[in-house]
């Protein structure tokens, strides 16, 4: 079994993994309005932020330089654990406008617990040569960050690869020439509907290192049990926010349900503190409530998986059941299962 639990020591506290990092939109123009969840959902004392977006938001950056802490700016307790990615996803179409050194300085200024290195995500349309250039560029940036990094925060090298061998080679190279506390696998979002490919890439990363493995951008309800099964230690997603924008209500075991499809119900099928006592109409009017519920749904999904594992039940039986309703994800899971069995 590849699923595992660990505790990591971070500057702002201990973090139990596996864990989901909700993406915070702070610094992005679209919103600073991720509703509060730290403290109310005890499993999620964490946040994923975009270093570049905050660095480029001048008024906010000035406040941060003048003594306001990032956590004050976000309205969360000072012991909130923050993973600051480089914002590399924004480089998939544009030019890189930072250096590893500048990004590290910003991550330090933000007092993040985990730094993700500058990276250039792969593009689906680009030719193989261009993607290989991007893979190499991300490796160079990571090694530069490794040279510049000191201090207590963890440094995760952002890794990209279009096939399992590339992912394996990247990690082996970084392991040999750099000093990293973990690895973060990117470029998964554009191929997320290709479950088989994603699963293979993740497994190749998992088997290339025993260190912490994070997967960028894939923390939705369907992927989460797969990631846990594959031994991924952490993941992040903004799907809970985007989903709420489309009035998508996440239900563990079912995925996303459009609120308009359940109009006949007076009560929602979720007992979380947001939905438990309120009516459907009430939640429909309140986007923040919907976002908060979606986070509860993700936390519940993780709790269930942990329950199955801790109580000694068979995780594969549980996942057989979980994925049986959907042919695509079921096939992906079956493939993953065969690969995992060969490994364990
Ligand atoms: Zn709920």
Image (cartoon, rainbow, N blue to C red):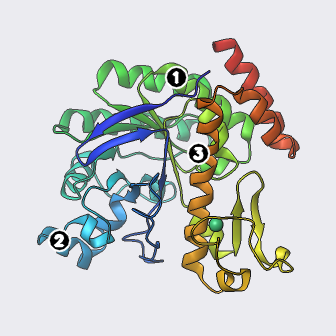
Nearer to us in this view, 174 or 21: 21
Q: Quadrant of the C terminus?
A: top right
Among numbered discs 1 and 3, the one appearing first in the sequence: 1
Give the spatial CA distance, label 1 vs label 3. 31 Å
Name the residue: 56% across, 45% down. 187
Q: Which residue is mark 3?
A: 303
Among numbered discs 2 and 3, the one appearing first in the sequence: 2
Q: Which residue is mark 2?
A: 68
Among numbered discs 1 and 2, the one appearing first in the sequence: 2
Q: Residues within 10 Å of mark 3 (few under 14, many from 20)?
A: few
User: Where's residue 95, x and y in %?
Assistant: 41, 57
Which of labels 2 and 3 is toward the front?
Answer: 3
Q: Are marks 1 and 3 in contact (CB under 8 Å)?
A: no
Q: Is residue 151 left or right of residue 255?
A: left
**Is 90 situated above or below 65?**
above
Which of labels 1 and 2 is toward the front?
Answer: 2
Q: Which residue is mark 1?
A: 168
Q: Residues within 10 Å of mark 1 (few under 14, many from 20)?
A: many
Which of labels 1 and 3 is toward the front?
Answer: 3
Name the residue: 43% across, 52% down. 88
Q: Quadrant of the N terminus?
A: top right
Name the residue: 59% across, 48% down. 218
The quarter of the displayed image where residue 3 is located: top right
Give the spatial CA distance, label 1 vs label 2. 41 Å
């Amino acid at each position: 079994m590849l699923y595992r639990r660990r505790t990591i020591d971070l500057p702002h506290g201990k973090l139990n993994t596996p864990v989901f990092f909700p993406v915070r939109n702070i610094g992005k123009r679209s919103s600073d309005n991720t509703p509060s969840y730290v403290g109310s959902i005890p499993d999620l004392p964490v946040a994923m932020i975009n270093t570049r977006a905050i660095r480029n938001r001048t008024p906010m950056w000035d406040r941060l330089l003048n003594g306001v802490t990032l956590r004050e700016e976000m309205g969360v307790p000072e012991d909130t654990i923050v993973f600051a990615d480089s914002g590399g996803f924004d480089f998939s179409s544009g030019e890189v406008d930072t250096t590893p050194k500048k990004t590290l300085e910003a991550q330090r200024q933000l007092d993040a617990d985990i730094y993700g290195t500058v990276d250039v995500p792969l593009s689906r349309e680009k030719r193989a040569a261009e993607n290989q250039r991007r893979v190499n560029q991300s490796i160079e940036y990571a090694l530069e960050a490794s040279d510049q990094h000191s201090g207590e925060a963890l440094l995760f090298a952002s890794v990209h690869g279009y096939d399992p061998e590339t992912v394996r080679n990247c990690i082996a190279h970084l392991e040999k020439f750099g000093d990293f506390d973990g690895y973060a696998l990117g470029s998964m979002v554009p191929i997320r509907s290709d479950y088989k490919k994603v699963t293979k890439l993740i497994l190749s990363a998992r088997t290339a290192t025993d260190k912490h493995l994070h997967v960028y951008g894939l923390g939705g309800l369907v992927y989460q049990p797969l990631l846990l099964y594959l031994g991924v230690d952490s993941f992040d997603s903004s799907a809970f926010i985007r989903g709420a924008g489309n009035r998508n209500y996440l239900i563990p075991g079912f995925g996303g349900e459009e609120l308009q499809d359940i109009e006949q119900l007076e009560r929602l099928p979720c007992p979380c503190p947001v939905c438990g006592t309120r009516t459907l109409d009430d939640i429909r009017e309140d986007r923040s409530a919907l976002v908060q519920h979606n986070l509860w749904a993700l936390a519940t999904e993780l709790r269930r998986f942990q329950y199955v594992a801790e109580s000694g039940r068979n995780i594969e039986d549980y996942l057989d059941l979980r994925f049986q309703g959907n042919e695509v994800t079921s096939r992906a899971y079956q493939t993953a299962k065969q690969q995992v069995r060969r490994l364990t």
